Amino acid sequence: NAGVTQTPKFRVLKTGQSMTLLCAQDMNHEYMYWYRQDPGMGLRLIHYSVGEGTTAKGEVPDGYNVSRLKKQNFLLGLESAAPSQTSVYFCASSYSRQRTSSYNEQFFGPGTRLTVL
Amino acid sequence: AQKITQTQPGMFVQEKEAVTLDCTYDTSDPSYGLFWYKQPSSGEMIFLIYQGSYDQQNATEGRYSLNFQKARKSANLVISASQLGDSAMYFCAMETVGNEKLTFGTGTRLTIIP
């Protein structure tokens, strides 16, 4: 099992450019998440999905869009990148969140370091 | 709204000593779970330990234990016999039933001194 994988690992964009980050999981998880991590701020949720074909906004959704066309994939798009979107982006997945238990552990990908100039 | 507070931005601990990382939380929901994750310098997030709000006993996983004080809304991580490999960022996080997201604290950077 590869677990949760993210591509690319690093990317440098110019302001105004667009890009898509791909997250894939092979654990048959229902729930998937995109976070951003900035110094001194922990991880903040951008968008999440509770199943194929569904998406929902998290804490900091502005400037991002997502799609979950297949259960195993969760895409994060930046339509017009801004320097404020320079961050490390983490994807995560979990079985379900119907009850609070250790089975709701989120499994994280290795992260994507994005720099917007 | 849920909130996690980690008041220790950084800690230095001598190797082989025990260390306690503080975490306080705020929620009005009676059913919730608390997680601790480790992030080494390589960047990946590693799940360490979980405590449910209705668990009667404090959670333990090897050298990790969770000092859960429900009335004080604290869930401190205790690492016994610290090792050099424990040097990392540590994040406390909380979820509540019906809320499909984890709320993270700002983290504590732990450095183990040989």
Image (cartoon, rainbow, N blue to C red):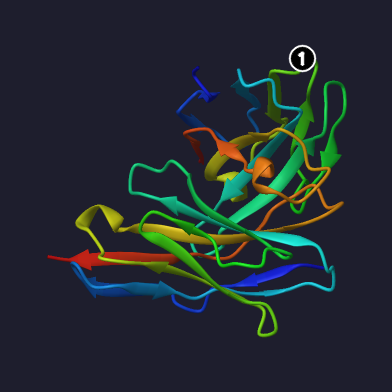
Question: Which residue is outermost to the bottom?
Answer: B72
Name of the residue lying farthest toward the front: B56
Q: Is residue B67 above or below residue A102?
A: below
Is residue B9 in view from this perspective?
no
In the image, residue A51 above or below residue A47: above
Q: Quadrant of the C terminus of chain B?
A: bottom left
Q: Position of residue A24 (x, y in %)?
A: 61, 20
Q: Nearer the viewer, residue A116 or A70?
A: A70
In the image, what residue occupies the spot 76% across and 67% down? B2
Percent coordinates x, y for residue B14 in the rendering: 19, 73
Q: Which residue is mark 1?
A: A70
Q: Is residue B95 left or right of residue A115?
A: right
Q: Which residue is depicted at the point 66% across and 67% down?
A: B56
Q: Quadrant of residue A22?
A: top right
In depth, the one of B90 and A57 nearer the eye is: B90
User: Where the N terminus of chain B falls, by quadrant?
Assistant: bottom right
Q: Name the spot of residue B57 as percent of width and height, x first.
A: 60, 67
Q: Chain of mark 1?
A: A
Left or right of A114: which side holds A84? right
Please tell me which residue is depicted at 33% across the width and 48% down the height of the picture: B41
Position above or below: A60 against B5: above
Residue placed most toward the observer, B25 or A63: B25
Quarter-wise, where is residue B8 in the image? bottom left
The residue type indicated by label 1 comes to: Lys
Report how many numbered discs are placed on residues in the image: 1
Q: Secondary structure at mark 1?
A: loop
Asked if residue A92 lies left or right of residue B108, the reply is right
Residue B7 position in % (x across, y down): 51, 79
Q: Residues within 10 Å of mark 1 (few under 14, many from 20)?
A: few
